[in-house]
Image: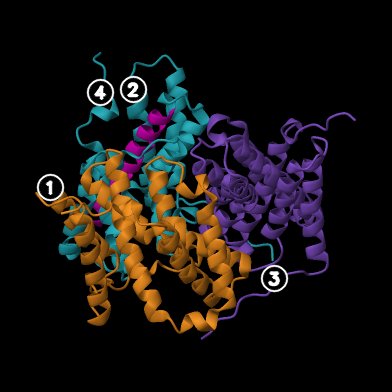
Chain colours: A orange, B cyan, C purple
Amino acid sequence: MPELPPLALIPAIDIIGTFVFAISGTLTAADKKLDPFGASVIAFATALGGGTVRDLLLNLRPVWIQEERLLITVFISVLITLLFRKEIGRFRKTMFLFDTVGIALFTILGMEKALRLGVPPLIALVMGVVTAVFGGVVRDILCNEIPLIFRREIYATACLVGGAGYLLMRLAPVPPGVPVWVAVGIIILIRVLAVRLKWAFPNLKSEE
Amino acid sequence: MPELPPLALIPAIDIIGTFVFAISGTLTAADKKLDPFGASVIAFATALGGGTVRDLLLNLRPVWIQEERLLITVFISVLITLLFRKEIGRFRKTMFLFDTVGIALFTILGMEKALRLGVPPLIALVMGVVTAVFGGVVRDILCNEIPLIFRREIYATACLVGGAGYLLMRLAPVPPGVPVWVAVGIIILIRVLAVRLKWAFPNLKSEE
Amino acid sequence: MPELPPLALIPAIDIIGTFVFAISGTLTAADKKLDPFGASVIAFATALGGGTVRDLLLNLRPVWIQEERLLITVFISVLITLLFRKEIGRFRKTMFLFDTVGIALFTILGMEKALRLGVPPLIALVMGVVTAVFGGVVRDILCNEIPLIFRREIYATACLVGGAGYLLMRLAPVPPGVPVWVAVGIIILIRVLAVRLKWAFPNLKSEE
C-alpha cells in the first residue's frame, strides 16, 4: 500500500484555506458596514489569525511574515469578494463546505506543527483547534461581538474530537497517512451532521 | 533565623491559583449564557491569560505550553464548577479570599520571573501586575465588556503598591524571604480594606 | 549633498510620539469614565500598542520592556493630561498635527525595523502601518468599540500610500535620506487633505 501524502504536500492547501476564510471575513465586515480598509483587516484576521495566535504561543514568527503569498491571497480574496458579493451570496452551501474542509485540515496541520516542536500531545491538540477556529474569534473581537463559537453549534468541538482521534490513531499500528485522513473525515462528518441535525450544546443559564 | 522558602517552592501554588481563577471565569461565562466550550475558553483565559501575556511580552513560550497539568487543572475546574454551581455560590467569601491571595502571589511570582531575565525593576513591576490582573482583562474582552478593573475598585493598585514595596525591600538590608511575605501581606491587606471600606478611585468625567 | 540624518537619530522622536499618543489615549479613557488606573492602561495601549504588536509578530521583545523611559513617558503624559484636560482641549489642532507627524514617522520607523530583519518588503509595509495605527486599534478594543479606523477616514491608508512610496523610492537612484522625508511628507499631506476635504472611503453596505 503506497504511503498517502502528508497534508503539507497538498499543493496550495494553505492558500485555498486562506482564500476561503478571507471571503467569510470580508462578508462579515460588510455586514458591519466597515470601509474597505477595515474589511481587509477583518479578512486578514479571519484567515490568518488562528495560525498567528498559534505561532505567537509557540514563540515562532508567523508564517505570513516570511512569505508574501498569504498576504497577497487575502488581498485578492477581499477584492473579488467586494466585486462579486451578490454572486458569492448564492454559493453559501459551497462556502460552508470549503469552510468545513478548511477547519478540518487546519486542525491537523496545526497539531502536526506543534507535535514536531516537542509540545505535549494534549497541548498540540489545543494548538490544532486554535489554528482552526481562532481566526473567527479574533474577527469577532475586532467586530465587537462575543465570539460566535462560544455560544453556538458544534464547531470547535468537531475539531477537538477529530484531533483527539488523530492522537489516538498515531499510537495505534495503522499505516502512516491513515490517521490524517480519518481525522479530517471525522471533523467534516461531525460538522456536517451538527448543522443538518441542528446539534448544539445547551447554553449555560445565569443563576441570578 | 531560617530562610523562608521562596514562593516557587510552595507546592502547587500555580495549580491552586489556576483552579480558583478558572472557577471565576466559568461563573462569568455562565452569566453570559455561553456554552460549555465557550466557558472552557473563558476559564482558560481568566486563569492563564495574565501569565500568557507576560510570557509573550518577555518573548518566552508560555508555561502551559510545556506542561499539561495547568490545562488539565482548568478543565477539571470547569467541570466541577458546572456541576456544583449552586454550592460554589455559597462560598463567595472564600472565593474572594482565594482570589486575593492569588493575585498577591502571582504579582510577586511574575515580578521575580521578569527580574531574573534582567528586565529593569519598573518594567518587572508592570509584568507582575500583568500576571496578576490581565487574565481578567482578557476574560472581559472575550465577553465583550470593558475590563472591570479599568473602572472599579482598588484591585490592580493593590498589586502595584505591594510590588513597589517588594522592589524597595529588596534594596534594604532585610533577611531574604522577608520582602516576599511582607509584599504579599501588603497586597492582601489593601485589597481586603478596599472592599470592606469601599475604597475606589473616582471615575473620570467626560468633558463633553 | 550631505546625507540627511536617518530617522532614528532625531533626538527623542519615540519619546515625543509616545507622549502625544498617550494624551489621546487618556482623553479617550476619560470619555469612557474609566478610573485613573484604566486611563493609564488605555494610554499605554494607545502609545505603545502598535510597536508592541509589531515586535510580537517579529518575535522580538518589545522595546519598552528593555528601557524604562517609554513607560515613564506614558505615566507623565497621563498625569499632565488629567491635570490640564481643559487646557489640552483647546489645542486639538496642534494635537492633530502631532498625531499626523507621529503616524508618519512611526510608519517609516516600523518599516525600517522590519526590513533590517530581512522581512519581505510587502510585509515590512504592513509592519509599518501596524506600528502607526494599531495602538488605536488596541485602545478601541479595550474600550469595547469597533476600531475607529475600520470605519472612517483616510488614516491607515495615508500610511499605506506613503510607505509604498518609500519602498519604490528605495529602489530608485535617489540620494539616501530622500525617501524617508518624501514618504513622511506624503503621509502628512494625504492625512491633512483627507481631513480638510473630508475624504473617506464609502462604507460597505449590508446585503441583507
Query: With respect to residue C28, does B123 lie above or below?
Result: above
- The overriding secondary structure of the stretch rendered in magenta is helix
Instruction: Give the residue pinned by disc 1.
Output: A171
Element on which disc 4 rests: loop
Query: With respect to residue C64, does C163 lie above or below?
Result: below
**Residue at far front of view:** A1
Instruction: Give the residue pinned by disc 2.
Output: B178
Of the image marks 2 and 4, the number of the one nearer the N terminus: 4
Element on which disc 2 rests: helix
> Given the image, on which type of amino acid does mark 4 rest?
Pro
Chain of the residue under label 2: B
Mark 1 against mark 3, which lies toward the viewer?
1
Mark 4: few/some/many CA within 10 Å (<14, 14-19, 20+): few
Query: With respect to residue C176, does B40 lie above or below?
Result: below
**Is residue B95 inside the magenta stretch?**
yes
B64 on left or right of B171: left
**Is residue B195 inside the magenta stretch?**
no
Instruction: Give the residue pinned by disc 4.
Output: B5
> Given the image, on which type of amino acid does mark 3 rest?
Phe
Residue span colored magenta = B91-114
Q: Percent from the top left, x then y, of residue C3?
A: 83, 30
Looking at the picture, do discs 1 and 4 lie on one chain? no
Q: Percent from the top left, x then y, of residue B59?
A: 44, 36
